Structure formats: C-alpha cells, structure tokens
Image (cartoon, rainbow, N blue to C red):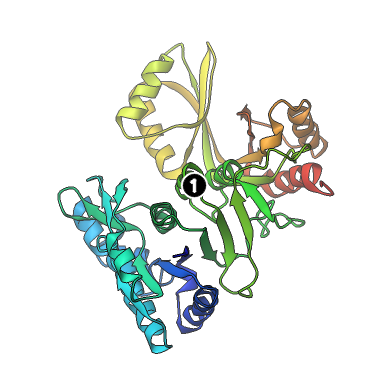
Amino acid sequence: MKIIVQKFGGTSVKDEEARSQAMKHIRYAVDQGFKVAVVVSAIGRKGAPYATDSLLDLVGGEDTKLSARELDMIVSVGEVISTAVMTELLRTNGFAATGMTGPDAGFRTNNDFQNAKVLDVDTDNIMEAFQTNDVVVVAGFQGLSRSHHVTTLGRGGSDTSAALLGAALGAEWVDIFTDVSGMMTGDPRIVKQAQFLEAVSYEEVANMANEGAKVIHPRAVEVAQQAHLPMHIRSTWDDVDQSGTLVTDRNLQIEHYRTVVGVTQQTDLTQFVVKTKAMATADVLNLLANNGISVDFINISPEKIVFNLNRSEAKQACSLLTQANADFETIAGCVKIAVIGSGMAGTPGITAKIVSTLAAKNITILQTTDSHTTIWVLVNGKDMEVAVNALHDAFLLNQD
C-alpha cells in the first residue's frame, strides 16, 4: 500500500471553489494509485465563521475567562467542521472516503493545552479505514491528552499533524498545500526580484520559517527531517502535476552548494539595551524568564546586555525593568533581517558583504549575530524594504 499525506490550510478549504480545487489534487493522487491521508485546517482565516480566531472571538478573544483546557474545546471545533465538510464533498463526488478527528486518528499528546506536544500517533484506525477507503480526512491541529481531554498543537499545528502522520504511516511524501506555489528566496510582497526555489534542505526551510517565512511551520520541518520524509510545498491553485518546492535532505554530492538560499525579515521588534552596572545580566534574564518572557537576538558584553522583543512582550518588559530600577534604553519599530544558507558555514566574506551592502545604502546596523547557517542584522523599520532588497540582490541574483 502506497500512502501520501496531503495537508490543506485554511485558505485551501475556505469556500466551495477552494475545496473543489483541493479535491482535484486528491483525485490525481488516488488515480496514481495512492491511498491519501488528507489533513485539513479550520475553514478560512479570521472573519470566516469557523476560523480559529473567529471561534476565539466567540469567547472573548484575549480577554476570555476560559482556561487553556476549555479554549482547546472550542478551537478544536474548527478542524472538525472542516473535516466533515471535506469528507461530504469527496463522497458526493464518488470518492471512497471517511473522516476522523485528531483523537480518532490516533494523535496522543501531553497535557500542555493550547501548545500540546504529540507523544505518539497510533495509525491502526487509519490503516483499517484504508482497507475500504482511498481517502481518510483527518482534523489537523489536535489530539487527545493523557487525561483524555482534547488538546491543540499551537499555531501552525496542522502542518505538524501532517508531518507526524506521514512519518507514522511511512508515507512516500507529504504535500503541504497553501496559497503560494512554494518557497521563494524572499517575500515576493517585499522583494521585487524574489525567485522560486525548486528544492531546499530541511535545515534551510526550517531556518526560513523560524525567521519570518510563513509558508510552513518549523516544527513540521523538524519532524520530517528526523524521519527523512520528503515534503512538497505546493499551491492548491496550481495544476495537479506542479510539484512546488521539494524539501529534503541536503544533497551532499553537490560540489558547490549555494551559499545563500533566502533573505527573510521579522518586523515590529523593540531593541533593549540594559546597562549591567545597575542590574546584573543574570538578574535581567531571570526577571524576564520568571515572567514568561523569552528574549530573542541576544548579545552580552561586560557592560550591557542587548536583546529584542515583540511589541506585546516589550511593553511588559519595560514595566518590569522600570520597577527593578534597571538602567535601560529601547528602540521601537526595528526589523530583524536574516540571511540564510547552508553554504555559508566556513565561507569567508559573508558578513563583510552584508555590512558593505547596507553601508552602500546608508543603512545603520543596530545589532548582529550569527550561526553556522544564518546571519542576522537589526535595522530601523524605515530601512526594511531597502535593506531586504539590497541583501537579496547582493546574494541571490544570478546565483546558480
């Protein structure tokens, strides 16, 4: 039995037209002889009646009085509705199909409501269903906790559901269907000359997802990498024979692997510079950690600690540091730009090229840090578009 997993996001199941387009991809796979596990997200995005954010608004949104367990009760409904609707469509059009909730499909999680971790996927029910069905539609984003409560996996959890299911079923590959044709070297809404990527390594796409590319959830990529499970990032609206971007192990046989694969950005950050004479570095970090704040893009020196937070956490951190009589300054509206590529490790001149490229555009670098596959720079928000395009063009135009 050959099995593939196809995951359809909210925009891919938002209305009858989108679901009919998704059905074409399912039919193509069935006609090719595959059994298909279809993982679906909730219908549409915020504003649509059954979208996750719309369901949260029914119970007060951010001001809800519900516990995390009770919130999982309501937000898990969106995927269940989507599963029933898609199963009905498939049966109406002649498919042998059945639907399952996450618990029905064997997803077992810990008790961390709203951000549960999957402990095991028992595929017995799905494999039994495949004896008489070509398609099993599964509600993504959810599972059953050790204490037998419904849990959800956090934002982007349907991607993770699809990857975990693919690994557990021994699938040939996983298709992640969305509203774009695959990974690009930059956000095409910002980068004027963004290019399509036919193939990327797990590490590269995970880094791009972590640094602002919203095409796939990084946890899903990590699962696929551990299982050596190929993934395709595809558009629901493309032809059925368009395979999108392949995500797989890096081909170590390539002698001259590309240096940079993409440039991404995260906006609306606040940079903190805390002088450590009045408050020790450890005390600053413990204060924030004890209040549930995780710092990002951190630099530590004997005189100061520099880090960044998003807008909501920045407001809380300012209050905490003021109460602690810390000596600190902030710069709001910053953008963290990431230059990403597996080929950067051990390649001289990458940082020099970044600095000179931005200097040529008179862009001030507020902060930098790096790993073996990513170099980050922090700039003022007003410089974002120019900086991202300049770095993209410097590293990626005409690169083989």
* Residue 3 rendering spot, x and y as whole percentages: 46, 64
Q: Residue at x 36, y 76 (%)?
A: 133
Task: Name which quarter of the figure residue 40 lies in.
Answer: bottom left
Above or below, 4 against 364 in this view is: below
Residue matched to label 1? 218
- Residue ranking furthest to the left: 147
Extreme-front residue of the structure: 1
Residue 220 visible, this orientation: yes
- Label 1 SS: helix
Q: Position of residue 296 (x, y in %)?
A: 49, 33
Q: Residue at x 84, y 49 (%)?
A: 398
Q: Is residue 116 visible?
A: no
Please give left or right for residue 34 compared with residue 140 in the image. right
Observer-nearest of 126 and 175: 126
Q: Is residue 38 above or below residue 97?
A: above
Position of residue 325 in the picture relative to residue 199 (left or right): left
Q: Answer few, some or many: residues within 10 Å of disc 1's Cα (few below 14, many 20 plus, some between 14 and 19).
A: many
Residue 92, given in percent of the width and then of the height, sits at 39, 89
Q: Residue at x 34, y 29 (%)?
A: 289
Q: Amino acid at mark 1?
A: Pro
